[in-house]
Image: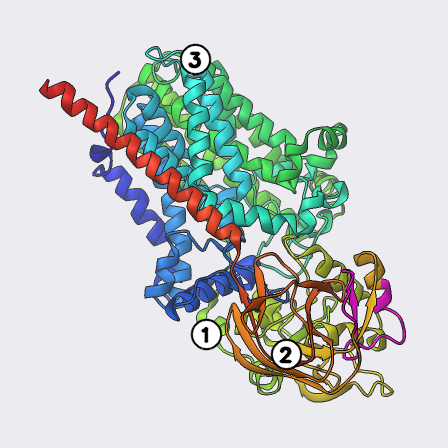
Amino acid sequence: MSRISIRRILVEKEFWILFLLGLIYFYRPLFFGESFFFRDLYNYYLPHKELVADLIRHHHLPLWDPYFQGGQPFLANVDNAVLYPSTVLYLILPSLTAFNWDIVLHVIFCSAAMYLLARILGIRPIFSVIAGLIFAYSGIALSSINLFLRLRSLPYVPLLLLFWHLYLMEQRKKWFILAVASGVLQIFAGGGEISIITILIAGGWTLFFEYSQITLFKRVAKFLLLFVFIIGCSAIQLIPMAEMVAQSQRDRGIKYEKAVTWSLNPKRLPEFFLPEYNGQVNSLSHKEYWIQKIEDTRYPYFLNIYWGCLAIILTLASSIADTKKLIPGAIRFFLLFLFLFGVVFSFGRFLPFFRVLFETAPFLSLFRYPIKFLYVSVLPVSLLPALLCESEFESRHSRKLPTLLWVVSVGLTVLTISLFIPDFSERFQAVFYGEVKGILAAQNLIHSSLHALGIFAAATILIELNRRKSNNRLDWLIAGIFGIDLLLAGYNINAFAPREILSYQPAVVPIVKKEIEHGRLFRNPTALMKLNAPSDDIIWGQQWDHETLNHFFGANFQIPVIYHEDIYDLEQRDLRKLADTVQSLTWARRMPLLTAGGVKMIITEETAPASLSEMRLFASIATSNAVPTNVYVNEKFAGRVWIVGETKITNDSEDALKAMLAPDFDPTKTVILENKLLEPTSSCKAKADLVEDEFSRSSYEVETGCNAVLVFAEPDLPGWHITLNGNPQKILHANTAFSAIFVPAGKYHVERFYQPRSVLIGAGVSTLFVVLLICVGYVSRLLRFFEYNV
């Protein structure tokens, strides 16, 4: 079966048009001093990329993050993408510049990978552009920018499928190696759900595509080998990640109510084909962003789910088209099934049978939020319209598709005219928005329906003209219609902000750093507050979070934080219980637990009770809202390491937490242990002086006149080791979530360092599989050499 070479594809003008389109479309963050920032981007992804770059520059292995969640494994958290190649950008470019190029290059990568797959399947260049446009610029793809690890993973869906398809066609080992490399890079990129989707799509492709030169049994065996090699080569990431998950809430599963939080509300269905159906995405106010009130949280998981009426209708119409010259009919229906499956299962809790499925099919919990199932639909809804256009513009004999398009055009015309009628518009708003939003929403709906009608009618006319008379210009016009549709609809999905707003250091940072020394920061959770902002633009909410170190923003400025929200359920589960408890208590009952966690500084909009002497007001900061932000010092702060002589033994973490909540608990005098301590302890003169403190290593000089316990306000996690004068010590589980060791009377040099065995094992397994993979390719080339010469 002949095919075009990848080298030839890479020099096609259509391929480079997609590349240039990405640069032009995102000109503001690339060339005009602005930046992406919304949601997880600036809160979470950028700080972690800055941290890994900082660690590498200072010759530290990026194994441990001392700033986030009281300290947590860094490489083990796949969301940090420590091993992903784009990390290099942050080593050679300013962080915000690297950040914006990282995002834009991945959007371009999405379009390029989809273009390559379409071309290898035999689709002409101009129609392959359509596939690339839908894959990279649909509402779901553009919404994935502020869910960046999903965007990083997305290009590898078509790329892995491309290399796997070439391997099964040609049986050349280089394609197998490249398919494995694509799967490994996708895992390193994060977004585990998309890795699962990719493997499932590749598995279905293996079963349903007609590879006459290889039996079904051999195809399945080779696919299993592909899966094994991807997992084996990724072990350096997967084994530490598995260890981290085993210590977190995720190890015990996610409750149904939390897992289905972001389910696709059926009221959002018109958004599939009405581009501005949801209102002004970049607004803080529900008065302009209509769907805030029908979502479980303030913002939906995907800010926009627009594919366009044209893409959806062509996807569904592929069931009546003849595309056997390019792909087998079984593959066409497999892709159509994937599209429908993704849409249906994204409804989650709105499906009457979903709870039963969730409880009986464990793999569903891996997606955590059902709306992520829409990622299953992205490849089919990109590839099928391109296949149908290729088939339709080549044959020009079928009346089925033009008839269908004319019927839909009439339907859109009726909808558009109806929306001009106030009574119909109000009923439409009441059904889909939950209430009547008024004239602004009515105008928005009319504008959206006119957009959809104009795009669809233009495409219908072009396909009708093509049926009557062939013209190469019509090919370009239909691709142009797809481009105009998606690029116009997606322009406002992602918000930008001037880089100076994101890069300046808030006034509170030097105030906290001046006093905090080796302590931690506790940021009191605060309800949404009214801001004194010039507009409803979401940048002002981001700026207030920034200037008050709201949530876990202190970690962005290398201030260690603890007891804050856990957005990915990867925090050590005992520490999570402790954090939830701290957030629910009064200030008087919080203070012992804050001291046990090494908290020295506290930020809150509340005023501490006058009777609480442990909280000393250090500074009051004027911010964007009417309420000042107060900075307090914990006067009971004992450091991150201290010695106690009194112990209390409990059975488990639940009993330990109850003991910590006792009115007389003082963490500077008593330690709660879950391990049975055989050595007696007593109160006497003792001290512990810090000698060295690095990212994943610290040392202390300890002197005690009696047997005592050295308490560390550090999470008790696998991989940490403590030595006493060079001798390894048993680490005790202390104060619900922290760690301690027994110290006999005397003087000691204590070292505490992070050296996780899981990373060493993972590196060894990955090395073994990489060597095997290279050997497979080398041996096959050697055999071919001997066959040729003998």
Residue 44 falls within the magenta-colored stretch: no
The answer to whether residue 591 is left or right of residue 49 is right
Residue projecting furthest to the left: 789
Amino acid on which the number 1 mark rests in the picture: Glu
Looking at the image, tell me whether mark 1 or mark 2 is earlier in sequence order.
1
How packed mark 2 is, by other alpha carbons closer than 10 Å (few <14, some 14-19, many 20 or more), is: many
Residue in the image at 55% along x and 49% along y = 241
Residue 675 falls within the magenta-colored stretch: yes
- The front one of 25 and 606 is 606
The part of the image, by quadrant, that contains residue 193 is top right
Residue identifier under label 3: 216
Residue in the image at 56% along x and 31% along y = 413
Residue identifier under label 1: 500
Looking at the image, tell me whether mark 2 or mark 3 is earlier in sequence order.
3
Q: CA distance from mark 2 to mark 3?
A: 61 Å
Secondary structure beneath label 3: helix
Q: CA distance from mark 3 to mark 1?
A: 58 Å
Secondary structure beneath label 1: helix
Residue in the image at 45% along x and 38% along y = 232
How packed mark 3 is, by other alpha carbons closer than 10 Å (few <14, some 14-19, many 20 or more), is: some
- The front one of 452 and 587 is 587
